[in-house]
Image (cartoon, helix red, strand yellow):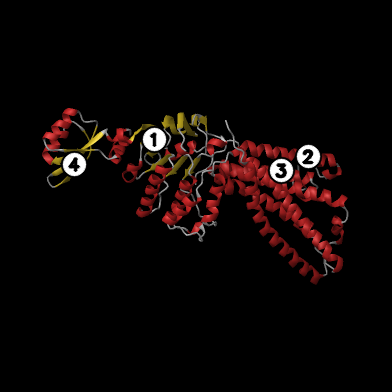
Amino acid sequence: MKQVKLYPKVAFDLFYEQFKWAIWFFAFLIAAHIIGIFIVVRNDASIPQFFVFSSQSVAIFMLICGIMLAYAFMAYYVQQGITRKDLYLGTILSALALALAVTLIPLAVNGLEHLISGFAALPIDSEAATLLGTASEWFPAAGIFFTNAFTYYLIGMLIGIGYYRFGWIIGFAFVGIAIAALSLNGYFLGDSGLSAAIPWIPHDPADASPFLSIGGSLLLIAALLASTRVLTKRISIKIQ
Amino acid sequence: MAAKVEMKNITLKFGKFEALKDISLTLESGKIHGLIGRNGAGKTSLLSLLAAFREPTQGQVEIDGEPVFENSEKMQQISFIFEKNYADEYEKVPAMLEFSERYRPNYDKDYANHLLKRFKLPLDKPIHKFSKGMQSALNVVIGLASRTPITIFDEAYLGMDAPAREIFYQEILADQAEHPRTFILSTHLVSEMDYLFDNVVIIDQGRLLLNEEYETISAQGASITGAADQVDAFVSGMKVLNEQKLGGTKSVMVYGTLTEQNQLTAREQGLEIGPVPLQDLFIHLTEEAH
């Protein structure tokens, strides 16, 4: 059986399409940040630097991209003769690239802010501004940001696939699973806000132990990768 | 380039409902196959199995002897064109066609441009603003220009007006002459499209009723035209499918092959014998099965 490997092409196309969405998203986010700077200047307050400012919204953006995957792309690609396997591999590669892009863009904007604040007083939270101070600090921060973005995409993908495959009633169960996964992710990556809302998640932050943090996060990603693959491996494509 | 389709004991169930019941059929390569059946007969289900959109509950779908599901080489050879919901499609025609061009090895851009002109499709208008007929015409352009060895049109003409449908039929025949492939056309418009078919597959209530060459099928019945009383006498005892009367002349469609004796008698009586339209046979066969 001669198999044609089309996933690199799929990965590129999916990344390209979603990167266009990311450009729009960051255009609005940067505008919001600039407006925020003007507002806090008047109130004599300060605003978090862009890297911190964007972290929650980027995660939500990735979640939505993930949710849309099943509905926006799956039928199109299978109709063009792409196998579910190629589509899955392409999707994961494109999600990794997208997560990298949405990590690097805020870093770059942050660096720019840092440069500007060198000769103009910006009302940016000075404590967080040290994030770009030394390489030993920003590298783990970027790593967490990237892992968080990628995990949110996978969780979104799981929700979208759940709805697509099982309809809206069972789809709700996938939202429940997603909330649990988001809480675990928050716990592993030190976002105490979300995990505190879920009673069964321990309140002690996991970032006290890097082993638990990294190991747990990788395990969560592995579980998400496996479940999305199992759910799409032989999925029926709907004819609209 | 064309490919042969084989379905072996295909059953498809949705819960307890059996959409397809033990269907086995072979579709020869390089021919135009007409797939006809009443609403809900299982045409789209059958085609979605062939296009690897889903897996059969039982049985195997093969292209040139290889299973099609998740087979990247075979899936690349199939285009499944069906009525799509373009309500959220903000792209324009060139972007849509670019997608096919990237993924279909035999895609012919010049041919696509020729078809776009023939269907008079605007290139600068978002697809969601197209009329239904124009959206169908775009589907047809994608299906024809992709030149996949197996091209399936599942009622692709929906919403197209008569002149546009005529262009569709002409283009199928013209391209088939130059670049033969295996076409599968599912349709309700039997009387309008029957001249396209080399082979006809009729399914009813999930079962295969018939899979035969068009010539063989049209010989399964006859139309007898002549003076009303003579025609009535001639067809007495025969299975009448349909009859029309105009003044003293009557035309009756009968089911079953006429014997040589019958044909001789008809000629002696001055009765005219012609082929029976596929439409009448289709109606008869699907009614009989109920």
Residue denoted by label 3: A181
Q: Position of residue B136 (x, y in %)?
A: 44, 51
Using the image, tell me which numbered label, if any, was put on residue B251: 4
Residue denoted by label 1: B205
- Is there one chain holding both mark 4 and mark 1? yes
Element assignment for label 2: helix
Q: Quadrant of residue A129?
A: bottom right
Q: CA distance from mark 3 to mark 1?
A: 45 Å
Residue depth check, mark 3 versus mark 1: number of the one nearer the observer: 1
Query: Up-down: is B79 above or below B117?
Result: above
| Identity, as a three-letter code, of the amino acid under mark 1 | Gln
Query: Up-down: is A131 above or below B18?
Result: below
Q: Nearest the camera: A40 or B57?
A: B57
Local packing at callout 2 (Cα closer than 10 Å; few below 14, some 14-19, many 20+) is: some
| Identity, as a three-letter code, of the amino acid under mark 2 | Gly
Residue denoted by label 2: A216
| Identity, as a three-letter code, of the amino acid under mark 3 | Ala
